[in-house]
Image (cartoon, rainbow, N blue to C red):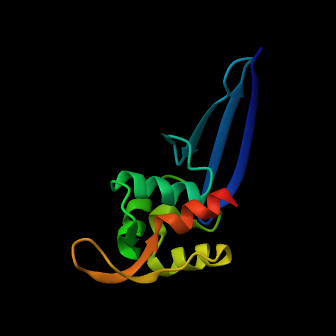
Amino acid sequence: MKSPIVLIWPEPGQRVVLVAETTHATPRCSCTQAGRTDSPEPMSLLDACLTAFSTAGDPAAMASADLVAGLRHLPGTAEGRWLYRDLTQQRLAHLLAPYRIHTRDTRLGNGRRLKAYHRADLAALGRR
């Protein structure tokens, strides 16, 4: 027997509806935003960041701008604060600061020296 669960929470200037159906098998979830159905949003900002690293080929470090670019295509909100598409480098830094995740001056493989997030820092947070 199916038991539909409907959760509604407001976003600035819009309404987001999450509909989940459960059966005795696997729960199914979809996110609807302004009449659009997308895949479910990442469980956490940490998961989203690690997914962006994975999509980029799992580099040891990613420039802040590159990580933000990798996150901006995701549906949903980052830590319930900003839509992923509205993230900036400063907003990402603000969201990761409570976890003590910060950029470091890093020389990337292409020789660029930039502020970068390190995958090991994010992975260590996941193990805590």
Locate residue 58, reporting x and y percent.
38, 56
Q: Quadrant of residue 57?
A: bottom left
Q: Quadrant of residue 81?
A: bottom right
Locate residue 22, reporting x and y percent.
72, 25
Count of number-bearing discs: 0
The residue under the point 41% across, 52% down is 54
Q: Report whether residue 78 is seen.
A: no
Q: Quadrant of residue 53?
A: bottom left
Who is closer to the viewer here, 107 or 116? Answer: 107
Locate residue 121, reporting x and y percent.
54, 68
Who is closer to the viewer here, 100 or 39? Answer: 100
Locate residue 18, reporting x and y percent.
65, 42
The residue under the point 69% across, 27% down is 21
Q: Considering only vertical position in the picture, is 124 above or below 89? A: above
Q: Report whether residue 55 is seen.
A: yes
Looking at this rendering, what residue extends furthest in the left direction? 110
State the quadrant of the C terminus: bottom right
Q: Considering only vertical position in the picture, is 71 above or below 4? A: below
State the quadrant of the N terminus: top right
The residue under the point 26% across, 71% down is 109
